[in-house]
Image (cartoon, grey):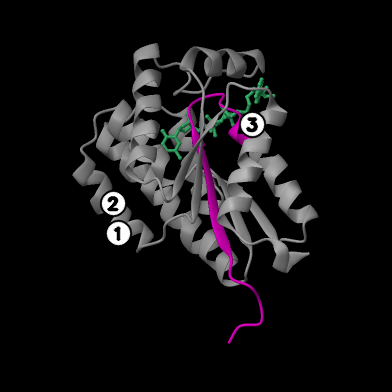
């Protein structure tokens, strides 16, 4: 028997500028403060090989949508094998800023990749790995894009896509949440940061027993 409590896998999802990165950092600090061993990671990326694929995906030219989904899953496979599974096996709580639901929302709902292609890639790449909890930060696309633009950084390839694309992505995330209510919680991310975080912390404490870490 291993000597540590089991690791947990929490993913944050949502459209552009929903506040995932901000809240992922905050959640990692909160859980660490409670004595929970945490690994904060992101997609695309999160391991050396996956970060190399990220550079191609975000800065390169466009791809055929199925090819793009395959690249996302190639990066994800590297991330899972090199980072996520070892961390979970060591008892860490892994918080990932995006995971497979992003491919379903962006490439399937946004770019028209068939759901069957997603299922086959996910089966090959993930071998059954699924988050214990997914927090979907929901914000109207216009508000999210305005937040992302206000940071002043150059827009990446996805941020430059039209409003219709971002509306399909948002609808995609909400459809995923409706189909998997046990795993997914939708958080109203249009609120002030403290309120968004309070809703996330509430979802975490309802799902997991944190007393063991005190
Ligand atoms: N992608 C990714 C796919 O197409 N398929 C896939 O399978 C995967 C994994 C990744 C891109 O790749 C695509 C999706 C993405 O387009 P990225 O650079 O990692 O690109 O970008 P995002 O994940 O989209 O992250 P962003 O940084 O754009 O958005 P976040 O993380 O949601 O937002 P955040 O926290 O950086 O906040 C944005 C700004 O808003 C402020 C913050 O201070 C910040 O300035 N903010 C708020 N302002 C007001 N109220 C709040 N509640 C706020 N919360 C944050």
Between 36 and 208, the one lying in front of the other is 208
Q: Is residue 140 magenta?
A: no
Q: Which disc, if any, is residue 196?
A: 3
> At 37% across and 48% down in the image, what residue appears?
73
Q: CA distance from mark 1 to mark 2?
A: 5 Å
Q: Nearer the viewer, mark 1 or mark 3?
A: 3
Q: Is label 2 within 8 A of ligand 1 (CB to nearest ligand atom)?
A: no
Residue 14 vertical position relative to residue 7 in the rendered view, above or below? above
Residue annotated with mark 2: 121
Q: Helix, strand or loop at disc 2? A: helix
Mark 1 and 2 residues: CB-CB less than 8 Å, in contact? yes
Secondary structure under badge 1?
helix
Mark 1 or 3, nearer chain start = 1
Which one is in front, 197 or 9?
197
The label number, if any, that marks residue 124 in the structure image: 1
Q: Which residues are magenta?
A: 1-22
């Amino acid at each position: 028997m291993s000597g540590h409590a089991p690791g947990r896998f929490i993913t944050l999802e949502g459209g552009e500028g929903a506040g995932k990165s901000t809240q992922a950092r905050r959640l990692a600090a909160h859980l660490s403060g409670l004595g929970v061993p945490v690994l904060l990671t992101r997609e695309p990326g999160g391991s050396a090989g996956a970060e190399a694929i990220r550079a191609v995906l975000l800065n390169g030219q466009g791809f055929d949508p199925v090819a793009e989904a395959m690249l996302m899953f190639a990066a994800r496979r590297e991330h899972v094998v090199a980072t996520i599974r070892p961390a979970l096996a060591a008892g860490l709580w892994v918080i990932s800023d995006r995971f497979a639901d992003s491919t379903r929302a962006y490439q399937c709902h946004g770019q028209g990749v068939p759901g069957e292609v997603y299922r086959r890639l996910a089966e090959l790449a993930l071998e059954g790995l699924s988050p214990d909890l997914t927090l979907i930060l929901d914000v109207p696309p216009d508000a999210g894009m305005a937040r992302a633009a206000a940071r002043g950084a150059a827009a990446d390839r996805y941020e430059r896509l039209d409003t219709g694309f971002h509306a399909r992505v948002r609808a995609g995330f909400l459809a995923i949440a409706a189909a998997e209510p046990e795993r997914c919680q939708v958080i109203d991310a249009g609120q002030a940061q403290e309120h968004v975080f309070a809703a996330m912390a509430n979802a975490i404490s309802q799902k997991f027993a944190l007393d063991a870490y005190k």
